Image (cartoon, grey):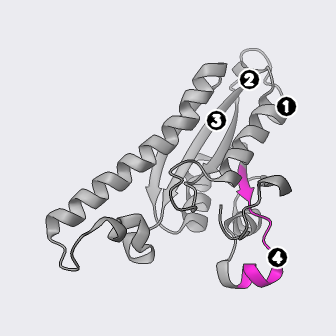
Amino acid sequence: MAAAEGTAPTRIMVAVNESTLKGYPHASISSRGAFDWTLNKIVRTNTSDFKLLLLHVQVPDEDDSELIGFDDVDSIFASPEDFRTMKRRDKIRGLHLLEYFVNHCHEIGVACEAWIKIGDPKEVICHEVNHVQPDFLVVGSRGLGPFQKVFVGTVSEFCVKHADCPVMAIKRNASQTPQDPVDD
């Protein structure tokens, strides 16, 4: 997989997301696992041969009341400024999430780019794959069972079926699975 001298580095898109566990404002278990797997199994010590493309997709406001911060609003009568403040806060949270991954890339000397998009994660990831055209995509997978998939759906399965590049879906380790496997 290493790039020959004078050729462009292999571009690996890694989809990352924030943990759904309350009180845990960090990268999800699955996205950290996908990122670490990419570094340990693909990049290894060939840091100049690869470029990581880190994509974080934030869910639109109407689909996730926790994302827009209703838990933080003291009144049910929110002003327009309350919503602007919540959107700024969510953007900052997304930037902190990407900062974690970018800092780690710089510590080990692998080139990277990172950006945030808003929308349905599975559709946005596939759209960005079409737009950016990475050599392949790495996504984390929670390893949900068939019953959970019906109600939750999986971004990784959708990407495997619909992304216009090879896709690696990395399952989280069984030892990292929270009490409720839907959590991440």
Q: Position of residue 29 (x, y in %)?
A: 68, 52
Q: Residue at x 18, y 79 (%)?
A: 77
Q: Quadrant of the N terminus?
A: top right
Number of numbered discs on residues: 4
Furthest-top residue in view?
5
- The Cα atoms of the two marked residues, 3 and 2, are separated by 10 Å
Q: Residue at x 44, y 76 (%)?
A: 63
The amino acid type found where label 4 is placed reads: Gly
State the residue in front, 96 or 15: 96
Disc number lying in front (1 or 4) = 4
The reply to whether callout 1 and callout 4 are in contact (CB within 8 Å) is: no
Magenta range? 138-150
- The Cα atoms of the two marked residues, 3 and 1, are separated by 14 Å
- Residue 1 is tagged as 1
- Residue 145 is tagged as 4
- The Cα atoms of the two marked residues, 1 and 4, are separated by 33 Å
**16 lies left or right of 41:** left
Residue 70 shows up from this direction:
yes
State the residue in front, 155 or 181: 181
The reply to whether callout 3 and callout 1 are in contact (CB within 8 Å) is: no
Badge 3 marks a residue whose secondary structure is strand
Q: Position of residue 115 (x, y in %)?
A: 47, 44
